[in-house]
Amino acid sequence: MNPTHTDAYLRRLGAGRPARPTADALRDLHLRHLRTVPFENLSVHLGEPVVLEEEALLGKVTTGRRGGFCYELNGAFALLLTSLGYDVQHLAGRVHGEEGRLGIPYDHLALRVRTVDGGDLIADVGFGAHSHRPLLFGERGDQADPGGTFRVVEAGGDLDVLRDGRPQYRLETRPRTLPDFRAGAWWHSTSPESHFTRSLVCSRITEDGGRITLSGRTLTTTDADGHKTVRELGADEEVLAVYRDGFGIGLRQVPTVRGRQFG
């Protein structure tokens, strides 16, 4: 990742280049990312490939001004952090589902980031509604965050990340490489069993700490106190305007769930 790419990424986030790879600088970049680069699965339904390669990831986030899901968002964020001097590892996770079932291997990608002053942290800008700040990797007590109360607990050699007492995902501690996640990205992009192929989502944190989410034609806004407003959008022009004004995404057509084209 060359300096030009780094500067373009930082401009997208509205951030300056940190003087040192510190924990405070990471927290700032993490929150800016969640506010600016939406969690979205539009590529799955627009027939766009999900490519886990440096040029494709950076192009989508910077010049394309798009978002993505975990592999793309955390994959791109890892490139940025590495270029700024952070020591970054890719960690594989499996999402906790119904009745305690775990998702597929390489179900989720999160990052272990070492700073020059704050030890190791878990950075995750690709899980949708989650922590606003990185979590302390070695802390086993409660970690208060605007997104909830989080806890990292031992799980038979792995780590479970809990939000408000509910397990979110299980992380391996062994470092992986980005190509290791290609099978997971392919499965989530193509399998009829993946929730990404069965639904549309575009979501980000708002500047006041709330959240704006567009699911198909359903627009949900949540304020910092958790109060929700739900509105059904009508004409295509209205939907496209929300993508443009609410998420900074310019689309020529309204995405629709591809449904039977998968499998």
Image (cartoon, rainbow, N blue to C red):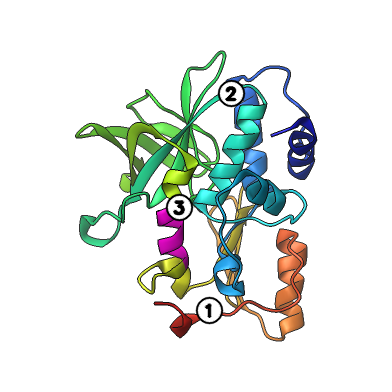
Q: Is there CB contact under 8 Å for labels 2 and 3?
A: no
Question: Looking at this view, is 203 or 207 the one in front?
Answer: 203
Q: In the figure, 110 relative to 71: above or below?
A: above
Tell me the distance, in whole angstroms, between the alpha carbons under discs 1 and 3: 22 Å
First in residue order: circle 2 vs circle 3: 2
Identify residue for label 3. 182
Query: Residue 251 lies in what quarter of the image?
Result: bottom right
Which of discs 1 and 3 lies nearer the camera? The answer is: 3
Considering the numbered disc 3 on the image, is that residue within a helix, a strand or a loop? helix
Residue 114 point in image, percent of width and height: 51, 21
Q: In the figure, 246 relative to 144: above or below?
A: below
Image quarter in which the C terminus is found: bottom left
Q: Which mark is residue 86?
A: 2
Identify residue for label 1. 257
Considering the numbered disc 2 on the image, is that residue within a helix, a strand or a loop? loop
Q: In the figure, 87 relative to 111: above or below?
A: above
Q: In the figure, 203 relative to 56: above or below?
A: below
Range of magenta residues: 183-189
Q: Residue at x 74, y 79 (%)?
A: 238
Q: Is residue 60 visible?
A: yes
Residue 167 point in image, percent of width and height: 31, 47
Identify the amino acid type marked 1.
Val
Direction from residue 6 to residue 38 in the image, left or right: left
First in residue order: circle 1 vs circle 3: 3
Question: Looking at this view, is 82 or 179 the one in front?
Answer: 179
Considering the numbered disc 1 on the image, is that residue within a helix, a strand or a loop? loop
Tell me the distance, in whole angstroms, between the alpha carbons under discs 2 and 3: 24 Å
Number of residues whose C-alpha sits closer than 10 Å to that of mark 1, classed few (under 14), some (14–19) or many (20 or more): some
Q: Residue at x 62, y 54 (%)?
A: 204
Query: Residue 29 lies in what quarter of the image?
Result: top right
Direction from residue 29 to residue 261 in the image, left or right: left
